Amino acid sequence: MIDYGLDLSEVDHRRALPGLVAEGDELDALVAAEADWTRPTPAAGWTIAHQIAHLAAADANVLVAVRTPEAFEETPEDADAVAAAGAAEPRAALLERWRTGRAEVAAALRNVQQFPWFGSAVTPTLMVPLRLMETWAHGQDVFDTLGVAHPATGRLRPIAALGVQGRTLSFHAAQLPIPAEPFRLELTGPGGETWTWGPAHAAQRIRGSALDFCLRVTHRRALAETGLTATGEDARTWLEIARVFL
């Protein structure tokens, strides 16, 4: 899992919640119109059904953590096995389960304060961007499978923020020293606006589109497939190893 010490103070989870709902609705419209959920996606061994089953299972985990925290398992289940089990369900049943679960998650995250999450404790400030990131990333796999453009929207901002805050995790996971120098990111948002993180004077710099950055940190695109540029050795290394999850 990602580092739950992340500082996402810039994210207002109540304002981000409609984005989570919209991202799910957008993917829902795409998969509901696709009759063949056995089509393989870019994730090895995963079909469209596996992708939706994974999202449904993750939503179910959130609901258990919020509603019955004492019953929440600290050890995550095998994601491949859970996705495979869900993918074996009838398409209509799986779709309805996912729809119900994500609606209940959106409602639950509006008022809860804190709940357990795989050995840590999280708040909606982190969980809303996490659910948005995962819905968007697994949705990207489905959009790619069906050859449909995945519209870039302002919903990328919380995902990019997760990616920025995941820098320490990226170096830790790669068993590399954590850079002491500050980093500067200048990303172009979907509307042409510039999103920035870090001090303007930082020598380690990354520039490019917010979409490319989100695709990179969620491992949906290789670095060479993006237009991201880096100045400084540590910045270049970060782009090569960037991630938001283990």
Image: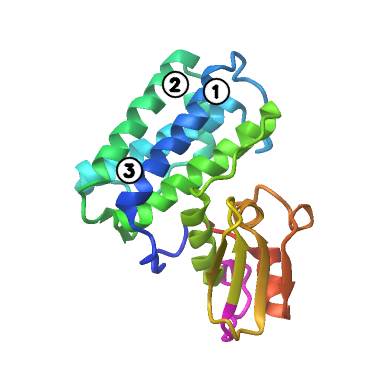
Left or right: 178, with 93 as reference point: right
Q: Amino acid at mark 2?
A: Leu
Name the residue: 59% across, 27% down: 48
Disc 3 versus disc 1: nearer the observer: 1
The kind of secondary structure the magenta stretch mainly shows is loop
For label 2, the SS is helix
Name the residue: 34% across, 50% down: 15
- Dot 2 corresponds to which residue? 95
- Among the two numbered marks 2 and 3 on one chain, the one whose residue lies closer to the N terminus: 3
Left or right: 67, with 35 as reference point: left
Between 158 and 191, the one nearer to me in the picture: 191
Name the residue: 42% across, 46% down: 131
Which region of the structure is painted magenta? 170-183
Residue 178: say if magenta: yes
- Among the two numbered marks 3 and 1 on one chain, the one whose residue lies closer to the N terminus: 1
- Dot 3 corresponds to which residue? 62
- Among the two numbered marks 1 and 2 on one chain, the one whose residue lies closer to the N terminus: 1
Whether label 1 touches label 2, CB < 8 Å? yes
